[in-house]
Image: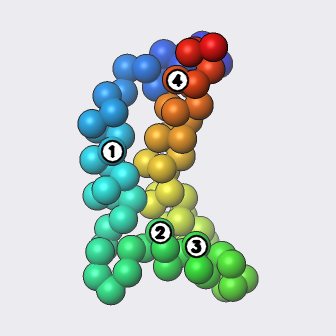
Amino acid sequence: MDQLTQILDQLPWSLVLLACLTLGLAPFVPEPHLWEKLKMLAAGTLVKPIDIFDLLMHAAPFLIAGLKLAVAGLSAK
């Protein structure tokens, strides 16, 4: 857990936010891939391995941002 905390502390917020805005939301037209994959997940049509991988790849920057926020919140206490 300490290693994860150290890694997340070393990642600058600017890089995490840039990843969220680029990889997390690309392609922007007609709709972000992440949004499309989340809709497929909600509809129960997210069954192909490539779609699952795509969801994980596009969600990764947001998961990292969430972990970074959680670690920052825990260290503030």
Image position of 21 with respect to 76: above or below: below
Which of pointers 3 and 4 indicates the residue nearer the eye? 4
Q: Nearer the viewer, residue 71 or 22?
A: 71
State the residue position of label 4. Answer: 72
Amino acid on which disc 2 is placed: Leu
Q: Label 3 crowding class (10 Å Cα cut-off): few <14, some 14-19, many 20+?
A: some
Q: Is residue 1 left or right of residue 32?
A: right
Tell me which numbered mark, 1 or 4, is placed earlier along the sequence.
1
At 66% across and 76% down in the image, what residue appears?
Answer: 41
Q: Marks 1 and 2: in contact by CB < 8 Å?
A: no
Which of pointers 2 and 1 indicates the residue nearer the eye? 1
Q: Which label was assigned to residue 58? A: none
Which of pointers 2 and 4 indicates the residue nearer the eye? 4
Q: Which secondary structure, mark 2?
A: helix
Tell me which numbered mark, 3 or 1, is placed earlier along the sequence.
1
Amino acid on which disc 1 is placed: Leu
Q: Which label was assigned to residue 17? A: 1
Tell me which numbered mark, 2 or 4, is placed earlier along the sequence.
2
